[in-house]
Amino acid sequence: MTISKGATLPDASLLQLGENGPEAVSLADKLKDRKVVIFGLPGAYTGVCTTAHLPSFIRTKDDFEANGVDEIICVSVNDPFVMDAWGKATGADKAGITLLGDADGAFTKAIGMDFTAPPAGLIGRSKRYSMLVDNGTVTVLNEEGSPGECEISAGETLLDAM
């Protein structure tokens, strides 16, 4: 099932790197009674993800906050060590973007946003998307037609749709 506007996101256990190593993060806890932006991308350190998608949310973070967004979460099918290093390398951590690893891709598959592109070495990865979620319900959903594109799912586009 592909997630759609008006749908409730399934709970998921995602991972982030904490002081003592990987820590489970309940997505349901992050969404309860909050307005949250979630964007998914094919992979940390990959081209468009690093040069366009993540930077679009770093640039727009203050504008999202001004519009009542409590948190911006980036989800990728990567381990929490890679997500932590990528956050530091890009400045996303200092900007306040939460980077969560969907290490086994369970959340990405549950919302129907998984894809595989063997020629690029991308197996079981996430399509590029962004969504606004209000108390667990998707109120805006923007999905790219191709993982190499970043216009529909960019921070600016989601902000304009609010």
Image (spheres, rainbow, N blue to C red):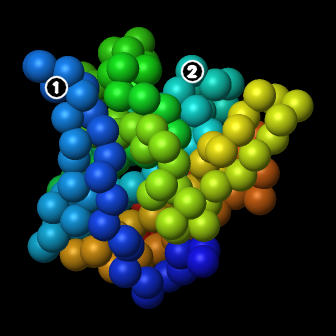
- Residue 59 location, x and y as percent? 40, 36
Q: Quadrant of the N terminus?
A: bottom right
Number of other residues with Cα within 10 Å of mark 2, as a class: few under 14, some 14 to 19, many 20 or more: some
What residue is rendered at 20% in x and 21% in y?
21
Which amino acid, by three-letter code, is at mark 2?
Answer: Tyr
Q: Does residue 66 appear anywhere in the picture?
A: no
Secondary structure of the residue carrying numbered label 2: loop
- Residue 156 location, x and y as percent? 50, 52
What residue is rendered at 60% in x and 67% in y?
112
**Residue position marked by numbered label 1 in the rendering:** 18
Which image quarter: residue 149? top right
| Side (left or right) of 39 relative to 144 | left
Q: Nearer the viewer, residue 137 or 116?
A: 116
Residue 58 versus residue 133 in the image, above or below: above
Q: Residue furthest bottom?
A: 6
Marks 1 and 2 in Cβ contact (< 8 Å): no
Q: Does residue 89 appear anywhere in the picture?
A: yes
| Side (left or right) of 56 relative to 51 | left
Which image quarter: residue 64? bottom left
Residue 73 versus residue 82 in the image, above or below: below
Q: Nearer the viewer, residue 98 or 80?
A: 80
Q: Nearer the viewer, mark 1 or mark 2?
A: 1
Secondary structure of the residue carrying numbered label 1: strand
- Residue 96 location, x and y as percent? 23, 34
- Residue 101 location, x and y as percent? 40, 38
**Residue position marked by numbered label 2 in the rendering:** 45
Q: Give how far apart the Cα atoms at labels 1 and 2 are.
A: 20 Å
Q: Nearer the viewer, residue 78 or 48?
A: 78
